[in-house]
Image (tube, rainbow, N blue to C red):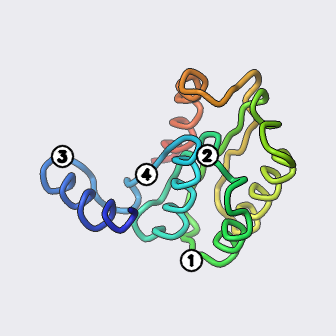
């Protein structure tokens, strides 16, 4: 899917719409499994995406592969990630607080600029994610 997005979809958008197509101005974001895909994209396609918003990312899925990817992906020092979980959803999966802390620590070890937060009263739903727009946009657009 990311090959299609980076090799076909993004070039099409850049060719047909007024964009700034360089890496510095190419961001990705998503929630739940889309949040996990955003982490994947900014790490594995770091030459294309400089910043990512991962809202309630499904980091409980394929944890070993995620941790290996974070440790080994070639990452530009200008990479920025916003990642959050809602306080009402953090216990939906076993050890999620611990896993969220582990992913946060691994990203920081890679010297990625990171805003990682637990959203007070946040839940796993679009209404909660919508309320996070000012937070993640502030993070992703800071110093752009």
Compared across the picture, whether 85 is left or right of 135 comes to: right
- Identify the disc placed on residue 18: 3
Crowding near pointer 1: few (<14 within 10 Å), some, many (20+)?
A: some
- Identify the disc placed on residue 110: none
CA–CA distance in space, label 3 to label 1: 29 Å
Quarter containing the N terminus: bottom left
Crowding near pointer 3: few (<14 within 10 Å), some, many (20+)?
A: few
| SS label for mark 4 | strand
- Identify the disc placed on residue 82: 2
Do the residues bearing badges 2 and 1 touch, measured as CB atoms within 8 Å?
A: no
CA–CA distance in space, label 2 to label 4: 11 Å
Instruction: State the image quarter where residue 61 is shown.
Output: bottom right
Q: Position of residue 133 (x, y in %)?
A: 52, 29
Q: Which residue is mark 1?
A: 74
CA–CA distance in space, label 2 to label 1: 19 Å
- Identify the disc placed on residue 27: 4
Name the N-terminal-most of marks 3 and 1.
3
| SS label for mark 2 | strand
Residue positioned 35% across, 68% down in the render:
3
CA–CA distance in space, label 2 to label 3: 25 Å
């Amino acid at each position: 899917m990311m090959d299609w997005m980076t090799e076909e979809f993004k070039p099409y958008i850049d060719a047909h719409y007024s964009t700034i197509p360089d890496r510095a101005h190419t961001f990705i974001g998503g929630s739940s499994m889309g949040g996990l895909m955003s982490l994947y994209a900014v790490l594995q396609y770091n030459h294309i995406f400089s910043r990512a918003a991962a809202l309630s990312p499904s980091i409980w899925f394929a944890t070993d592969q995620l941790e290996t990817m974070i440790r080994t992906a070639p990452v530009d020092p200008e990479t920025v990630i916003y990642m959050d979980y809602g306080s009402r959803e953090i216990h939906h999966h076993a050890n999620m607080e611990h896993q969220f802390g582990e992913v946060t620590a691994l990203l920081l070890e890679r010297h990625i600029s990171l805003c990682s937060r637990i959203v007070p009263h946040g839940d796993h739903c679009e209404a909660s994610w919508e309320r996070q727009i000012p937070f993640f946009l502030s993070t992703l657009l800071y110093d752009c």
